[in-house]
Image: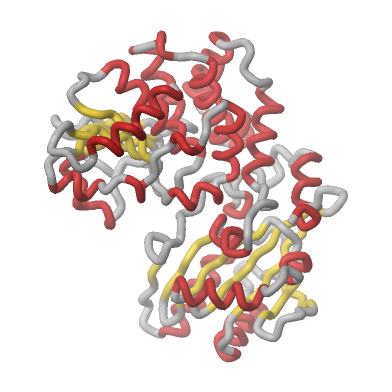
């Protein structure tokens, strides 16, 4: 598969400005989590072995190359399976719109079944869809649609490979697919509510064909640990890693940080970096939610409000203090920065999923006209990968518990910065 990926890069560089041949691009979703990345790589490889050779089959990661560093679990998996990130192709390295205008693009969507509004001009190029989310696309004679609500899109890709071309499976490809299935299905635990019989069937099939795959539990935990590792990130990358944007009369984002608020507030030149970040994205205010853990593995949540506008900062802070649905139980704590209001959050069950409606209600009341937008597709804000601890996933509910390794990793994060 490394040879295939290397040839893809060489082919793109050699042929992108030529009149022929065409490109068959396999495109994952904009979050580019492990499932999306693996599905794009694996299905493109499958097509390269089974489809007619009159087009160049290319897997394309649907993020900028510079944003891969935010996907720490993706990078961990690539290292574990022996792939160099330099072999991958990213959205800012291939102009799909230009290929479409030239009539040289065929597009297969994996891990999503409709294009975002920014890519609607590519719709005529879509020739196949494989996805596990709610179906929003109508099947057509020219575009086969495979949508099943299994836990992982990689399950559907594994099924296609085993049914149509099992000979292309090797240890490396199997480990990629296995990792994606384990992560999306939360280690195949029924209590998490993600895994389906088909996911279990194809995870077991990979285990049976490749007995030397990493042990299931240890592999899942290593991937999960990597997902929340922010030790190598700068301040801007930490803010972007797990972030959602909301806009009304104010443009603001909620970023989740896997570090204690005390350690984050002690970062050098923090206010200058936050100010520059807000200017670059056109933001009026930043909401920072942190999550860390006690020695007994109990979650600690803290909250900070950053804005150079004292009026904006005070309005948001007071609204959050008064919130009752749910009550955040905020207790003010000391902040060394004049433009940051900091709190300990007593309600540790109130994840960002619970905070977001409160923020939207604040903006609606402030605006008085009900208009509200989600800014996740614009301004360089990458969509949040799925199964985030802050989105109320099964891990956040404590169904499976956190390993001691993950607990230690988050607790000691600042020591490695």
What quarter of the picture does the C terminus occupy?
bottom right
Relative to 127, is 136 above or below?
A: below
Decide if residue 285 is in sight here: yes
The image position of residue 233, as x and y in percent, is: 63, 55
Give left or right: position of 273 versus 406: left
Residue at the image point whose x is 36% and y is 41% from the top:
112
Q: Nearer the viewer, residue 122 or 372?
A: 122
Relative to 218, is 366 above or below?
A: below
Give left or right: position of 62 versus 339: left
Q: Nearer the viewer, residue 408 or 327?
A: 408
State how many labels appear: 0
Farthest residue in the bottom direction? 311
Residue 160 in which image quadrant: top left
Give left or right: position of 23 versus 215: left
Relative to 407, is 174 above or below?
A: above
Residue at the image point whose x is 58% and y is 85% from the top:
308
Residue 109 in which image quadrant: top left
Residue at the image point whose x is 52% and y is 33% from the top:
84
The image position of residue 24, as x and y in percent, is: 24, 32
Give left or right: position of 324 versus 145: right
Farthest residue in the front direction? 14
The image position of residue 6, as x and y in percent, is: 40, 29
Residue at the image point whose x is 76% and y is 70% from the top:
266
The image position of residue 388, as x and y in percent, is: 58, 49
């Amino acid at each position: 598969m490394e040879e295939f990926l290397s040839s893809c890069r060489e082919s793109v560089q050699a042929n992108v400005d030529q009149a022929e041949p065409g490109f068959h691009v396999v495109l994952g979703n904009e979050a580019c989590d492990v499932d999306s990345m693996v599905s794009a790589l694996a299905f493109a490889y499958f097509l390269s072995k089974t489809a007619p050779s009159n087009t160049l089959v290319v897997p394309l990661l649907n993020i900028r190359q510079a944003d891969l560093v935010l996907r720490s679990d993706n990078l961990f998996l690539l290292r574990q399976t022996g792939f160099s990130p330099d072999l991958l192709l990213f959205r800012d390295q291939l102009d799909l719109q230009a290929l479409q205008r030239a009539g040289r693009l065929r597009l297969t969507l994996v891990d999503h079944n409709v294009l975002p509004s920014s890519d609607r001009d590519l719709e005529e190029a879509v020739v196949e869809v494989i996805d596990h989310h709610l179906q929003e696309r109508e099947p057509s004679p020219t575009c086969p649609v495979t949508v099943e609500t299994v836990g992982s899109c990689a399950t559907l890709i594994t099924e296609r490979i085993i049914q149509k071309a099992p000979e292309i499976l090797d240890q490396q490809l199997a480990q990629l697919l296995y990792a994606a299935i384990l992560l999306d299905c939360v280690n195949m635990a029924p209590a998490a509510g993600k895994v389906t019989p088909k996911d279990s069937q194809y995870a077991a099939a990979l285990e049976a064909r490749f007995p030397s795959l990493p042990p299931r539990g240890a592999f899942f935990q290593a991937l999960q640990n990597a997902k929340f590792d922010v030790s190598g990130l700068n301040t801007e990358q930490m803010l972007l890693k797990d972030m959602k944007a909301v806009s009304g009369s104010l443009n603001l984002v909620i970023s989740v940080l896997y570090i204690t608020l005390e350690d984050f507030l002690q970062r050098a030149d923090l206010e200058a970096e936050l100010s520059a970040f807000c200017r670059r994205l056109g933001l009026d205010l930043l909401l920072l939610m942190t999550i860390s853990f006690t020695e007994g593995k109990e979650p600690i949540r803290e909250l900070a409000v950053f804005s150079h506008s004292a009026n904006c900062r005070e309005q948001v802070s007071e609204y959050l203090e008064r919130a009752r649905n749910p009550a955040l139980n905020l207790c003010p704590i000391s902040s060394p920065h004049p433009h940051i209001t900091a709190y300990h959050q007593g309600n540790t069950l109130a994840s960002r999923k619970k905070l977001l409606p409160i923020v939207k209600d604040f903006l609606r009341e402030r605006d008085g006209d009900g208009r509200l937008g989600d800014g996740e597709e614009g301004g360089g804000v990458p969509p949040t990968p799925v199964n985030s601890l802050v989105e109320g996933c099964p891990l956040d509910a404590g169904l499976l518990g956190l390993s001691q390794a993950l607990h230690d990793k988050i607790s000691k994060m600042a020591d490695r910065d």
